[in-house]
Image (cartoon, grey):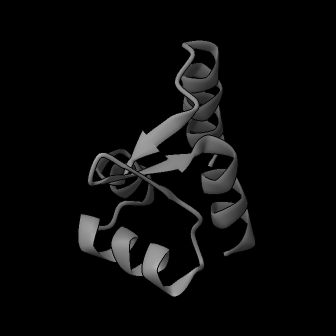
Amino acid sequence: MRERKRNIVIEIMAGRNYLTTKDNAKRMSVGVPTVRRHIHSGELQAKRVKGTYRIAIVDFERFMFDQ
């Protein structure tokens, strides 16, 4: 968990405020369809940008710590 938090801090410092479903799947150690299921069920907040989902790092953190 500590490594995951460090990676999120690095992402924020690098100016990336949003992650793709693939990025989130890697961090959660699940497949992209699982991330999409969480989005569709409303458990994970996401924005649709040009046909792809973008998840705010803050929303990803909230989702992970609420699990």
Q: Give the side of residue 53 with respect to residue 62, left or right.
A: left
Q: Give the side of residue 64 with respect to residue 19, left or right.
A: right
* Above or below, 58 relative to 62: above
Q: Quadrant of the C terminus?
A: bottom right
Q: At 54% from the left edge and 13% from the top edge, which residue is drawn?
A: 14
Quarter of the view holding residue 66: bottom right
Q: At 56% from the left edge and 41% from the top edge, which residue is drawn?
A: 4
Q: Give the side of residue 66 with respect to residue 9, left or right.
A: right
Query: Residue 47's x, y, as percent?
Result: 50, 55
* Above or below, 65 relative to 21: below
Query: Residue 2's x, y, as percent?
Result: 65, 40
Q: At 57% from the left edge and 16% from the top edge, which residue is drawn?
A: 15
Quarter of the view holding residue 33: bottom left
* Above or below, 4 relative to 61: above
Query: Residue 52's x, y, as percent?
Result: 30, 52
Q: At 66% from the left edge and 55% from the top edge, which residue is drawn?
A: 59
Decide which of 20, 66 is in the foreground and name it.
Answer: 20
Decide which of 2, 18 is in the foreground and name it.
Answer: 18
Quarter of the view holding residue 32: bottom left
* Above or below, 3 relative to 11: below
Q: Residue furthest front?
A: 50
Query: Residue 53's x, y, as percent?
Result: 38, 55
Q: Residue furthest top?
A: 14
Q: Residue furthest bottom?
A: 41
Q: Number of callouts in the render? A: 0
